[in-house]
Amino acid sequence: MPLWPQNSTRISTQRKNGPAPGEIGQNYNTEGNQVTQSMVYVGMVGDMLHAGHINIVTKARELGQVIVGVLTDEAAASYKRVPFMKYKERAKVVENIAGVARVVPQETLSYKPNLLEYKPKFVVHGDDWKFGDKVSVARQEVVDTLKEWGGELIEVPYTTGVSSTLFHQALEEQGVMARNRQARLRHLFEVKDCVRIIEAHSGLAALIASRTRSSNKTFDALWQSSLTDATLRGKPDIEIVDNGSRLSTINEIFEASTLPLIYDGDTGGFPERVHQLARSLDRAGVSALCLEDKTGVKRNSLYGQEAGQKQAPIEVFCERIQAAKAASGVGDMMFISRIESLILGEGQHRALERAEAYLDAGSDAILIHSTAKDSSEVSDFSRELRRQGHNQPLLVVPTTFANTPITELADAGINGVIYANQLLRAAYPNMVQVAKEILDYDCCPDQISARYLASTKDILDLIPVPR
């Protein structure tokens, strides 16, 4: 029998220094005696195990004692979607695979820290990681690190016909992902540097948000905006659309997407009304209720001080927080306090004072709102809040500083970025232009279709008829 699996690629390295090859990967049993098996390292997420994972472990155990580095939630989220199961659950499953001697956490996409600690004789991985910027860099780092003691990278051919991504998609289609939708938002804030959130005003918008990909980036959650919901109905943004109508929109969104959803509840009104709203949202499976700390007739915050809006007294808004938290009971729905101090000219000190009071009252997160032309105002707020020892999630709505990269906001300590109205704003000018040009031409010529319109086939294929 060959020392390494047949049909696999063996990448050998020459030892530069350190222990002799015969000593590499040797272990000790409980009596302190040397075990002659070589140590073999396998890294995996282990979220949805399939034949490919078992094949790699089977190949690895032919070489020696198998240690599996299960990527932590944070490590996995750094280059792909957040795992369906949390780390402890995944580690428990992997350690029960036949042939696995030990499971350890791999806390980064990089294998290097664990390789330096365990100095395995072999690393076994599927050959699919030759492709993709982040994983190919990780692969080269493994090769370079193994050179230090003459270790070997063995690459097993990718198992065709199976994919964790496809399994994840199947779970979405079967509605399994929707059942843990509410709790997922909390987990996202725990494991991601910055959560990407975009508004959804309809089932179609939610579908677009869920399916859009760019490299390894996706949208993590949805924002159900009072502005876009009212605009879609041809009504002003003055808290006029009743909660029943908005819950109907949420049901349509949940039919189209399994992403967590944050509900923009405006001021919420009296505590009794907030209690009932939070109760309805919790039962519907909404992940978070966000209320702003203004009082009186609602006016959109983008009007700034011109609208004559005033903030509610701190103690009054804290009553709203407590009413919402009491309604959700032991559920997983979060409460997000939206602070308007910067917009209304109250300054950083007042905003920080309110943040501390709201967190003490039970708020799970803070949304600091600003209409500044750049992100310096919210970044300064974030740094000071962190300096004071508050680590709860902090979100922003960068409508007026939308050109600020998410990475820059994350570096300032901001955990979530909400694109609160962009999808509806994208649809509006195109609809206006198409309507006008149809009148101009007195028909709908090919040039209109080419510039503005999806094909009828694309629309039909977007949501196929069930078979």
Image: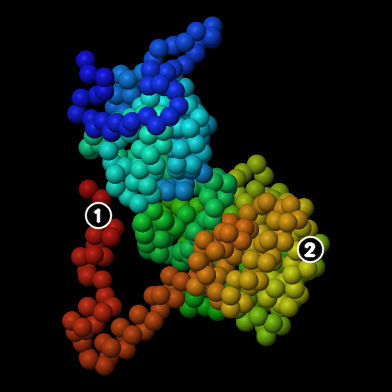
Q: Which residue is at the front of the view, 253 or 11?
A: 11
Q: Residues within 10 Å of mark 1 (few under 14, many from 20)?
A: few
Q: Which mark is residue 465?
A: 1
Q: Nearer the viewer, residue 369 or 233?
A: 369
Badge 1 amino acid: Val
Residue 38 - label: none
Q: Which of marks 2 and 1 precedes in the sequence?
A: 2
- Give above or below for 379 relative to 334: below
Which-is-in-front pick, marks 1 and 2? 2
Q: Quadrant of residue 455?
A: bottom left
Tag 1, which secondary structure?
loop
**What colour scheme has been applied to the protein in the rendered image?**
rainbow
Vertical position of residue 437 compared to residue 464: above or below? below
- The residue drawn where x is 58% and y is 59% is 411
- Which label was assigned to residue 353? 2
Q: Residue at x 79, y 63 (%)?
A: 353
Q: Position of residue 10 (x, y in %)?
A: 26, 31
The alpha-carbon separation of the residues under discs 1 and 2 comes to 54 Å
Task: List the single residue furthest toward the bottom.
Answer: 440
Residue 274 placed where, x, y %?
A: 68, 59
The picture places residue 297, in percent across and down from the top left corner, at 68, 76
Quarter of the image holding residue 269?
Answer: bottom right
Q: Residues within 10 Å of mark 2 (few under 14, many from 20)?
A: few
Q: Is residue 440 left or right of residue 345?
A: left
Specify whether 191 is left or right of 19. Answer: right
For the residue pair 132 and 234, the one nearer the viewer reads as: 132
